[in-house]
Image (cartoon, rainbow, N blue to C red):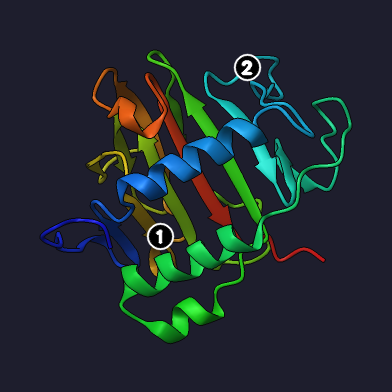
């Protein structure tokens, strides 16, 4: 979509596709500006508290449905109880285009109906342990958009957190979609690469990641 010379799709695993440079600079700026607004209202971005009492090193704000370990709710039950912001129609449409482009399949894109988004902010020291996205009742693909600093994205197998896994460098503007046989693959972010983002998108430091999901909830 954005590169002067389109970069090739890379299938990391069956159903898991990396599309470098999918978002152009203007689209990245627009998404960063939108994330700034979502981070403050109606529910503020927060570090999620896990059942063991520890807080995640990333900070998160949700759209459509609020995620807290390990469920979705319409209100931010662990962050003040406010009603979460709606998932914008334009963001859902971006998700449909992402699925179409990643899978080179218009029908798959047209059928994609995300109803939730998690927006995660990583500072220089943040990371995400290997986990499965399995709190959704639907196994529709997960769409992941990267903004700001690059990161190492570890994409593993569906059985456990160990090998085999593949480390993928995700840069600002990159798209990653995983569904089908890889929908329940373990994945995480062992590290961010500070200072690798382009400040021109409005994010001087850190990484933003937007993931779109279909919860399958009413």
Q: Residue furthest left?
A: 5
Q: Is residue 81 above or below residue 55?
A: below
Tell me which residue sits at (31%, 39%) in the image: 172
Compute the Cα span from label 2 to label 1: 26 Å
Q: Where is residue 149 drawn, in percent x and y?
A: 32, 28
Q: Which mark is residue 22?
A: none
The residue at which mark 2 appears reads as 55
Cβ atoms at labels 2 and 1 below 8 Å apart? no
Mark 1 crowdedness (10 Å alpha carbons): few <14, some 14-19, many ≥20:
many
Nearer to us in this view, 60 or 135: 60
Tell me which residue sits at (32%, 45%) in the image: 25
The residue at which mark 1 appears reads as 178
Tell me which residue sits at (42%, 53%) in the image: 185
Mark 2 crowdedness (10 Å alpha carbons): few <14, some 14-19, many ≥20:
few
Q: Where is residue 178 drawn, in percent x and y?
A: 40, 60
Tell me which residue sits at (25%, 46%) in the image: 164
- Identify the element where label 2 is drawn: loop
- Identify the element where label 1 is drawn: strand
Q: Quadrant of the C terminus?
A: bottom right
Q: Where is residue 201 drawn, in percent x and y?
A: 37, 34
71 sits to left or right of 203: right
Count of numbered marks: 2
Asked if residue 145 shows in the view, the reply is: yes
């Amino acid at each position: 979509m954005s590169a002067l010379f389109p970069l090739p799709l890379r299938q990391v695993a069956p159903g898991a596709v990396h599309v470098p440079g999918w978002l152009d600079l203007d689209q990245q700026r627009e998404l960063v500006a939108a994330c700034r607004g979502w981070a403050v209202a109606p529910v503020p971005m927060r570090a999620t508290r896990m059942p063991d009492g520890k807080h995640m090193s990333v900070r998160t704000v949700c759209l459509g449905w609020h995620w807290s370990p390990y469920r979705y709710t319409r209100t931010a039950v662990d962050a003040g109880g406010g009603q979460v912001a709606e998932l914008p129609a334009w963001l859902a449409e971006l998700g449909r285009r992402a699925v179409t482009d990643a899978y080179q399949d218009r029908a798959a894109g047209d059928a994609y109906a995300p109803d939730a988004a998690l927006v995660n902010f990583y500072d220089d020291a943040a990371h995400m342990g290997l986990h499965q996205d399995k709190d959704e009742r639907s196994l529709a693909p997960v769409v992941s958009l990267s903004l700001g600093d690059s990161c190492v994205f570890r994409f593993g197998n569906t059985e456990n957190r160990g090998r085999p896994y593949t480390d993928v460098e995700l840069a600002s503007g990159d798209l990653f979609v995983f569904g089908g046989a890889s929908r329940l693959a373990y994945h995480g972010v062992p590290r961010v690469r500070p200072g690798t983002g382009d400040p021109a998108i409005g994010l001087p430091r850190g990484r933003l990641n937007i993931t779109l999901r279909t919860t399958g909830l009413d």
